[in-house]
């Protein structure tokens, strides 16, 4: 029998309200204030019948949560249907590039028929003659040999090691008078070739030219660790390329490593110390700002090469991904706040054809009455209110006073036309698994205390909303009505037909219901103290959370301690099957088994709900399936395997705090426009793609970055400059609709070497890493690693072909200075948690969680994650505290850096590993650990706390300093002793990416392999 109300089920266990009160002897709240006091606990006051599909009972006019997209589902924008784009009415098909304006660029005279880009090397292309002479390179035939070697990436290259190769250093003849090619752009006309009226003295474009004059480099000493770091290493004779003399000019163009050993010698002939190492971390490409001071800062937008290829043939010869990394809400340093501009009722000024926002690269004409769009060249009217006269050079007199005309990053206050509904208040809904493992691990107490401590700092005061739903084999709703003195719990046991037992007060205003929420958080740890329920009905709980949140949207935080076992979305223990590795089925372990979670994610995104997943299980909990909730909603995955409050409590506390209190952009969408001839094709990160180029982001914050690949739409680019504009439309926590706009320009080049010269390794590694993680969802890990290696080899081979013929540098691996760390970073991606080894190397859940992290990490954090920082710390412990930070030096990631008498710290941004050398004085160790090592053999349980001695205080200060450098994650501190297996192997050795581990190459072997393959 099913009552019409649908909210009462025979046999549904009803938890007494008093369950909230520790001790359980307190009587229920006065009946007058409780809607459930009149006999039936689920009286539904006057609600409409609940449809079986789970439509939320309240707000009957609201959008149905499942199936039919609600009006607001397309985001907070008026009149949007997906094909129409969010920022206006321009149809993509009628977008900026529909009406191709006739070529007005400087190369119009080059007949297209002379553009045989398919096979001819660029120097013979039409641009070559139009441009400056290309020096000695023009006559160099480019070897076209296909890459034939089949790489065997993780096999020790024994043959290479023992194969003597004749050194080339002495045999190098003086090169024929080498004339360095003039900078590509130096002959170029002003970049705004579209626009004859472009003021010639426009400062940004004048200043842009020196960018492509390669600064004269002397051969830098290879980065090495502190003296003595390689104490045990045989000293190889310096094998770098000769400096000065005949090779001086060459050195300006590329770097090289000599890889030749003396005949008969067994040593590989590689100067191990001299190998390039990114010990200073990410190199933000700020030098482009000198050439393009109107560009946004690279912390927001980075291209994989700051030189856009002019032709498809250049693209195909580049071999590395062409694209960008966007970090739209990157935190700016103090004093560099993003300017906010309010055009008021006049509205934001945009190109009427392509909807580009007005930016520093637009130009003005007709005495200031018109402005020309830099993306599509359309001449737009300047609104009367915005008019300003031009000076003799065509600049507006007010240009420097207007941030939108002088800064690459600004925010516009959006008018009501950018909304279809009022901006919603920030809302936080918590879905907490309270089954037995969550209770036993101490999780509930950490979560409750942390949330309570954050209540004052939740963004959006006084509008923020909050709510909780707990679940095991049943769903527990909590009524936070402000007139209550205690929250009330209502249990729903029908998992097949989820309904809300209460129309309102499940998601409440925090200010109004603060005392009820606090009371709930105080009692949560004890409320389920005796719970022995092992079941977890996550799927039904998600549907319930959706019903609660669908009207407002917001953030859903899911705390999951076990594999979902009941109701829709239950998952089976498919586990980590060793037999699948190396077969065609291997990747299926890493993709969701049940489409339910992806479907839920789609519904969440439509309704502006972002999901963050927190995993705590000691057993398999199918992160692959559940993580999709975060993947498609702009959310984040946190993984605390085998969570125990005593060990992991601080990490969870700090990371949850960060998640709840960081500035967040709500109800957002992001689009990246680019100029004529190029197009972003694929996007990589956590979002849902709505239409072809619009990223739906229910919530986004400063810890999320996105990557995208760029392709050429035309075989030949006739423009001099390509412009990019990132626009993030969002609701601020204070309830204001905003548009954050980042604008950047990059030159178009016809010279492959220029693409290499302007390459950005950090952006390339970010994009390659994301593509590799995605490929691992469709292919074997081994194949993914081989693909990475192949890209690297092809790229360096192509680069080598640019130089090798003239200069006879056979015995050297040559590479552009800009990519000197790329081989090591690619090796590091192959050895990363997400992609390393096979079955036994990483648990499947940890592998998937790492993959989800790699999809969102900003460049700097990603690089530190795959090539962690290693420091020796015992030597600085006796220093003055203020000198410690500056004295920490990063070391190469190899065992050879570790002295048995030292203490080392490995920091990958998520974990600290403290490694104690075998020969350390016991008293030093005891001082730091706070216990006697002899009495504490199991270091896996140890908790580092500050002890009352100088060593301990300084040691803890180091940890604190490093943690404060990046607050987005909190490093859990683990301690391991030298030789303590298997922990040392798993925690440390597998992260020493320069060393050979079972089945993987050392850095030296890797370089030798790459070198061999680039020559084949
Ligand atoms: Zn336009």
Image (cartoon, rainbow, N blue to C red):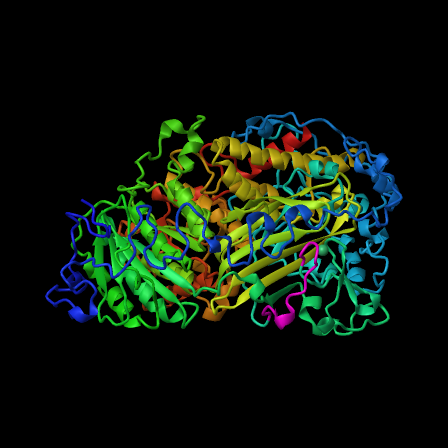
Query: Viewer-proximal residue, 32 or 650?
Result: 32
Q: Report the magenta stretch's main SS.
A: loop
Residue at the left extreme, as displayed: 25
Q: Quadrant of the C terminus?
A: top right
Ligand 1 positioned in quadrant: bottom right
Count of numbered circles in the view: 0
Image quadrant where residue 283 sits? bottom right
Residue 658 vertical placement versus 302 (above, below): below
Q: Is residue 484 left or right of residue 250?
A: left
Residue 839 appears in the figure: yes
Q: Please give the name of the residue rendered at 80% of the width and 37% of the height, measured from the top-left corner.
A: 122
> Which percent across, then down, holds residue 999?
47, 32
Image quadrant where residue 597 sits? top left
Q: Is residue 690 left or right of residue 248?
A: left
Q: Is 952 in the magenta?
A: no
> Which percent across, then down, holds residue 624?
40, 41
Q: Please give the name of the residue rendered at 68% of the width and 48% of the height, measured from the top-left corner.
A: 94
Image quadrant where residue 751 sits? top right
Residue 932 appears in the figure: no
Q: Is 337 in the magenta?
A: yes
Q: Is residue 289 left or right of residue 391?
A: left
> Which percent across, then down, holds residue 135?
86, 42
Query: Viewer-proximal residue, 845 or 728?
Result: 728
Residue 792 vertical placement versus 653 (above, below): above
Query: Viewer-proximal residue, 109 or 67?
Result: 67
Q: Which residues are magenta?
A: 336-356
Q: Quadrant of the N terminus?
A: top left
> Which percent across, then down, holds residue 847?
42, 41
């Amino acid at each position: 029998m099913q009552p019409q109300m649908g909210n009462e089920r025979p046999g549904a266990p009803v938890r007494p309200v008093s369950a909230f009160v520790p001790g359980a002897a307190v009587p229920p709240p006065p009946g007058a204030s409780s809607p459930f006091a009149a006999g039936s606990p689920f009286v539904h006051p006057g609600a409409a019948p609940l449809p079986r599909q789970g439509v939320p009972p309240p707000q009957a006019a609201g959008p149905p949560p499942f199936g039919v997209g609600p009006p607001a589902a397309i985001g907070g924008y008026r009149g949007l249907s997906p094909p129409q784009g969010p920022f206006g009415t321009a149809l993509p098909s009628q977008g900026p590039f529909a009406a191709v304006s006739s070529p007005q660029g400087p190369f119009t005279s080059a007949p297209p028929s002379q553009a045989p880009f398919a096979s001819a090397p660029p120097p013979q292309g039409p641009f070559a003659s139009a441009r400056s002479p290309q020096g000695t390179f023009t006559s160099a035939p480019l070897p076209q040999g296909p890459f034939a070697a089949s790489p065997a990436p993780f096999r020790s290259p024994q043959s290479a090691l023992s194969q003597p190769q004749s050194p080339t250093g002495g045999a190098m003849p003086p090169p024929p008078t080498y004339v360095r090619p003039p900078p590509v752009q130096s002959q170029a006309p002003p970049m705004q070739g579209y626009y004859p009226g472009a003021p010639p003295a426009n400062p940004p474009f004048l200043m842009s030219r020196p960018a492509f004059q390669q600064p004269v480099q002397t051969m830098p000493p290879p980065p090495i660790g502190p003296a003595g770091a390689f104490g045990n290493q045989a000293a190889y004779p310096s094998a770098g390329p000769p400096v000065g003399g005949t090779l001086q000019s060459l050195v300006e163009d590329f770097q090289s490593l000599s890889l030749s050993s003396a005949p008969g010698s067994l040593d590989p002939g590689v100067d191990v110390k001299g190998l390039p190492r990114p010990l200073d971390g990410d190199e933000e490409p700020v030098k482009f700002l000198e050439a393009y001071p109107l560009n946004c800062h690279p912390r927001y937008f980075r291209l994989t090469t700051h030189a856009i290829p002019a032709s498809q043939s250049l693209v195909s010869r580049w071999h590395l991904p062409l694209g960008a990394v966007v970090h739209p809400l990157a935190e700016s340093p103090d004093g560099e706040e993003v300017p906010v501009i309010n055009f008021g009722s006049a509205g934001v000024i945009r190109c009427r054809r392509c909807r580009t926002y007005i930016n520093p690269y637009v130009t003005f004409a007709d005495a200031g009455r018109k402005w020309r769009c830099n993306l599509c060249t359309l001449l737009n009217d300047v609104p009367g209110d915005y008019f300003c006269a031009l000076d003799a050079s065509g600049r507006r007199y007010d240009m420097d006073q207007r941030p939108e005309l002088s800064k690459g990053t600004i925010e516009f206050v959006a008018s009501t036309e950018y909304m279809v509904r009022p901006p919603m208040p920030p809302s936080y809904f918590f879905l907490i698994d309270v089954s037995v493992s969550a209770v036993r691990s101490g999780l509930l107490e950490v979560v409750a205390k942390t949330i309570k401590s954050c209540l004052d700092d939740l963004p959006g005061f006084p509008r923020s909303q909050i709510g909780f739903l707990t679940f095991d084999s049943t769903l527990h709703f909590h009524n936070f009505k402000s007139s209550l003195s205690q929250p009330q719990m209502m249990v729903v046991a029908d998992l097949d037909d989820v309904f809300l037992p209460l129309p309102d007060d499940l998601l409440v205003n925090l200010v109004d219901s603060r005392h009820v929420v606090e009371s709930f958080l105080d009692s949560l740890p004890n409320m389920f103290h005796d719970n022995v329920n092992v079941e977890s009905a996550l799927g039904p709980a998600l549907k319930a959370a959706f019903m609660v949140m669908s009207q407002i949207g917001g953030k859903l935080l899911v705390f999951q301690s076990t594999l979902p076992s009941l109701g829709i979305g239950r998952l089976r223990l498919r586990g980590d099957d060793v037999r699948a590795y190396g077969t065609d089925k291997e990747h299926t372990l890493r993709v969701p088994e049940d489409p339910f979670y992806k479907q839920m994610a789609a519904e969440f995104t439509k309704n502006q709900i972002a999901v963050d997943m927190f995993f705590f299980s000691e057993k398999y909990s199918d992160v692959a399936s559940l993580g999709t909730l975060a993947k498609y909603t702009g959310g984040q995955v946190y993984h605390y395997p085998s969570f125990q409050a005593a060990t992991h409590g601080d990490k969870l506390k700090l990371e949850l705090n960060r998640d709840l209190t960081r500035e967040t952009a709500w109800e957002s969408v992001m689009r990246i426009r680019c100029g004529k001839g190029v197009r972003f094709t694929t996007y990589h990160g956590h979002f849902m793609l709505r239409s072809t180029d619009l990223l739906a982001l229910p919530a986004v914050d400063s810890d999320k970055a996105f990557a995208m690949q760029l392709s050429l739409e035309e075989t030949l680019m006739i423009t001099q400059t390509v412009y990019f504009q990132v626009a993030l439309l969002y609701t601020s926590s204070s309830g204001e609709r905003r548009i954050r706009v980042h604008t950047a320009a990059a030159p178009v080049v016809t010279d492959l070497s220029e693409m290499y010269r302007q390459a950005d390794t950090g952006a390339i590694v970010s994009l390659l890493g994301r593509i590799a993680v995605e490929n691992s969802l469709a292919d074997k890990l081994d194949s993914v690693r081989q693909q990475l290696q192949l890209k690297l080899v092809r790229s360096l081979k192509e680069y080598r072909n640019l130089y090798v013929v003239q200069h006879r540098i056979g015995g050297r691996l040559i590479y552009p200075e800009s990519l000197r760390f790329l081989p090591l970073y690619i090796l590091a991606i192959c050895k990363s948690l997400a992609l390393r080894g096979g079955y036994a190397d990483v648990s499947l859940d940890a592998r998937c969680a790492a993959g989800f992290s790699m999809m969102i990490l900003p460049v700097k954090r990603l690089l530190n994650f795959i090539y962690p920082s290693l420091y020796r710390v015992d030597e600085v412990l006796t220093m003055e505290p203020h000198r410690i930070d500056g004295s920490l030096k990063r070391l190469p990631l190899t065992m050879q850096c570790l002295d048995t008498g030292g203490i080392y710290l490995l920091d990958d941004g998520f974990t600290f590993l403290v490694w104690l050398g075998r020969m350390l004085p016991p008293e030093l160790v005891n001082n730091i650990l706070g216990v006697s090592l002899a009495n504490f053999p199991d270091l896996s349980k140890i908790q580092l706390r500050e002890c009352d001695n100088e060593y301990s205080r300084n040691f803890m200060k180091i940890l604190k300093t490093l943690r404060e450098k990046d607050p987005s994650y909190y490093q859990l501190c683990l301690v391991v002793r030298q030789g303590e297996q298997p922990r040392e192997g798993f925690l440390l050795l597998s992260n020493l990416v320069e060393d050979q581990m079972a089945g993987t190459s050392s850095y030296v072997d890797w370089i030798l392999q790459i070198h061999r393959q680039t020559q084949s």
